[in-house]
Image (spheres, helix red, strand yellow):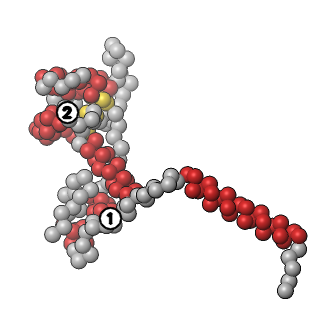
């Protein structure tokens, strides 16, 4: 039988001590009787965050919803705002007005705003007035002018949605992608 040298014994004892400390430390971090998260808990958290962002995106009034170079909403914008008004009391989101970036110039008004900034402020005031008419609490704090994060194109969201568990049947993934590429709402697709 081979005997271990002193240096080998010391090395093995050091490794054993480190292993025991790591195990002990891990057990201190996890309380006794802790139950692990169910399968999919972290995926659901990610999906919930994406759904929250999608709900917030409902509260964006885009530049195409305004009549050209005015502070008056076009029919699409009026319908959109009429859908938002009942939700203002229950949803935590602010209305975000997408700034008009098409206009450029250095001409400033008396307040030092360019023409585009002045138009954006007029649009903000118009929305605030509509919120006041519907008795929304603190409308000045609920209407912002801000650029909007880029989203997904319809065909991209179909492909992402199909990678989730229960996200789509394998039989009709191609037909779903073709038929609903432009009709995707909040990342969900109705498979047929």
**Residue found 77% across the figure and 63% down from its top:** 14
As drawn, is 105 to the left or to the right of 179?
Answer: right
Q: Is residue 35 above or below residue 61?
A: below
**Residue found 26% across the figure and 38% down from its top:** 60
As drawn, is 19 to the left or to the right of 7?
Answer: left
As drawn, is 134 to the left or to the right of 4?
Answer: left
Q: In the rendering, at what x and y percent does residue 179 appear?
A: 18, 66
Determine crowd level at label 1: few under 14, some 14-19, many 20+ residues with C-alpha closer than 10 A.
Answer: few
Q: Which residue occupies the foreground of this view, 89 or 3?
A: 3
Secondary structure under the numbered disc 2 in the rendered image: loop
Instruction: Give the distance between the C-alpha atoms of the residues marked 2 and 1, in whole angstroms.
Output: 31 Å
Q: Which residue occupies the foreground of this view, 53 or 60?
A: 53
Determine crowd level at label 2: few under 14, some 14-19, many 20+ residues with C-alpha closer than 10 A.
Answer: many
Q: In the rendering, at what x and y percent does residue 137 appear?
A: 21, 23
Residue 88: assigned label: 2
**Residue found 37% across the figure and 61% down from its top:** 38
The N terminus: image quadrant: bottom right
Q: In the rendering, at what x and y percent does residue 73 appear?
A: 15, 33
Q: Quadrant of residue 156?
A: bottom left
The C terminus: image quadrant: bottom left
Q: Is residue 175 above or below residue 93?
A: below
Is tag 2's residue or tag 1's residue first in the polypeptide sequence?
2
Q: Is residue 96 above or below residue 176?
A: above
Q: Quadrant of residue 178?
A: bottom left
Can residue 75 be seen by looking at this rendering? yes
Secondary structure under the numbered disc 1 in the rendered image: loop
Q: Quadrant of residue 113?
A: top left
Mark 1 sits on what residue?
Answer: 164
């Amino acid at each position: 039988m081979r005997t271990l040298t002193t240096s080998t014994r010391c090395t093995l004892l050091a490794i054993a001590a480190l292993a025991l400390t790591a195990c002990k430390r891990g057990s201190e971090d996890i309380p006794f009787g802790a139950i692990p998260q169910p399968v999919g808990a972290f995926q659901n958290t990610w999906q919930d965050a994406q759904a929250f962002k999608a709900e917030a995106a409902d509260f964006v009034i885009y530049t195409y919803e305004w009549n050209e170079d005015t502070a008056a909403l076009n029919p699409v914008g009026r319908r959109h705002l009429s859908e938002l008004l009942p939700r203002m009391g229950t949803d935590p989101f602010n209305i975000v007005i997408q700034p008009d970036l098409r206009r450029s110039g250095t001409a400033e008004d008396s307040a030092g705003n360019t023409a585009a900034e002045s138009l954006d402020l007029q649009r903000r005031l118009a929305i605030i007035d509509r919120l006041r008419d519907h008795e929304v609490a603190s409308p000045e704090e609920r209407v912002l002018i801000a650029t909007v994060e880029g989203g997904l194109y319809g065909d991209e969201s179909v492909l992402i949605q199909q990678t989730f568990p229960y996200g789509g049947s394998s039989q009709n993934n191609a037909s779903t992608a073709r038929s609903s590429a432009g009709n995707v709402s909040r990342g969900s697709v109705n498979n047929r």
